[in-house]
Image (spheres, rainbow, N blue to C red):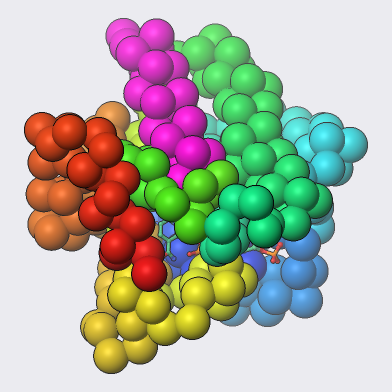
């Protein structure tokens, strides 16, 4: 049976990805900290699509809770076929003014948890000769981000790490896709502390979480290494490398104001 683990499944892109997998009759293993939200999603997907949905409450920035999640998954299924590392958050502000605990939690979640889950499940997928992994990065991965320095750097890690292990896994039946959304209409902006600035300007029509999830799902199935959502985002991500790095930082700084 096809089984997927989705982190950050309680809202936004993760929740919509759960719907994509449910439509294709997967056994869904969903995790996040908000147990109530997970329970609602479980009931809705089971009723609508007749699939089995199992939920596990965990704060993935805490190593002990990550281990507990991995042990739970190993009990739920002998063969995880799909892994979606989607849980993540950002924070805005000058680096010197940011809260250290929040930075630490962000690196623990965006980097450590994602890497740890890949490290646990990749060998099992490789032994089975099949696996699909989606790591949710961002268009933030393609340049440094003044006023969001730690977040942009974590996403740069996700992109490079994902491309590297995808390269290592060529020919094994296991592929890794780095999904890179641009600004998307979810809880992300509120959690990160944006006040209607240039990127999340309330007057702009941002892509929905559903649009981004469906795009990512398709690209993962096509085994794309990097999937940038939206043509404008694709152009911006790919042209930045032709400009002097100082200029790219200055432009990003302006856009973040
Ligand atoms: N929205 C955007 O503009 C955008 C752009 C590019 C990339 N992204 C990336 O897309 C991914 C999904 O974000 P989203 O936009 O869908 O935002 P979201 O609606 O805020 O969803 C974030 C998810 O992560 C979970 N999460 C947060 N902290 C966690 C923790 N410590 N342990 C376990 N789960 C945790 C949240 O669940 P609980 O709060 O219930 O734990 C929630 O399910 C993130 O990696 C984000 O960086 C978003």
Q: Which quadrant would the C terminus be assigned to in this image?
A: bottom left
Kindly identify the residue that appears in the image at 21 percent across and 43 percent down. Answer: 247
The correct choice, above or below, for 15 with respect to 88 in the image is below
Q: Is residue 86 magenta?
A: no
Kindly identify the residue that appears in the image at 65 percent across and 51 percent down. Answer: 96
Q: Position of residue 250 (x, y in %)?
A: 28, 50
Provide the residue span drawn in magenta. 152-173
How many numbered marks are there?
A: 0
Of 89 and 35, nearer the camera is 89
Q: Position of residue 39 (x, y in %)?
A: 73, 73
Left or right side of 202 for 230: left
Kindly identify the residue that appears in the image at 39 percent across and 55 percent down. Answer: 24
Q: Is residue 166 magenta?
A: yes
Q: Position of residue 9 (x, y in %)?
A: 60, 61
Question: What secondary structure prevails in the magenta region?
Answer: helix
Left or right side of 205 for 7: right
Q: Quadrant of residue 159?
A: top left
The correct choice, above or below, for 40 with respect to 102 in the image is below
Q: Position of residue 81 (x, y in %)?
A: 51, 33
- Residue placed furthest toward the bottom: 203
Left or right side of 187 for 238: left
Q: Quadrant of residue 144?
A: top left
Do we see residue 76 in this rendering? no
Q: Quadrant of residue 237?
A: top left
Kindly identify the residue that appears in the image at 34 percent across and 82 percent down. Answer: 201
Of 2 and 39, nearer the camera is 39
Do we see residue 231 in this rendering? yes
Of 55 and 61, nearer the camera is 61
The correct choice, above or below, for 133 with respect to 195 in the image is above
Q: Quadrant of ligand 1?
A: bottom right
């Amino acid at each position: 049976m096809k089984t997927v683990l989705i982190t950050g499944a309680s809202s936004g892109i993760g929740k919509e990805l759960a719907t994509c997998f449910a439509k294709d009759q997967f056994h869904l293993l969903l995790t996040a900290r908000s147990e109530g939200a997970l329970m609602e999603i479980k009931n809705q997907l089971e009723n609508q699509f007749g699939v089995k949905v199992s939920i596990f409450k965990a704060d993935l920035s805490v190593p002990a809770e990550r281990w507990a999640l991995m042990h739970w998954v190993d009990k739920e299924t002998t063969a995880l076929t799909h892994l979606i590392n989607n849980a993540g958050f950002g924070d805005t502000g000058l680096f010197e003014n940011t809260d250290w605990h929040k930075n630490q939690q962000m690196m623990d979640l965006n980097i450590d948890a994602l890497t740890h889950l890949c490290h646990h499940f990749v060998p099992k997928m490789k032994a089975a000769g099949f696996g699909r992994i989606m790591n949710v990065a961002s268009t933030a991965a393609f340049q440094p981000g003044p006023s969001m320095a730690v977040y942009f750097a974590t996403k740069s890690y996700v992109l490079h790490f994902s491309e590297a292990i995808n390269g290592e896994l060529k020919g094994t039946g296991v592929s890794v896709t780095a999904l890179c959304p641009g600004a998307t209409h979810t809880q992300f902006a509120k959690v990160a502390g944006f006040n209607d600035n240039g990127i999340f300007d309330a007057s702009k029509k941002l892509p929905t979480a559903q649009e981004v999830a469906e795009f990512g799902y398709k690209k993962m199935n096509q085994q794309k290494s990097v999937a940038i959502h939206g043509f404008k985002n694709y152009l911006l991500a790919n042209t930045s490398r032709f400009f002097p790095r100082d200029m790219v930082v200055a432009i990003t700084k302006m856009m973040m104001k």
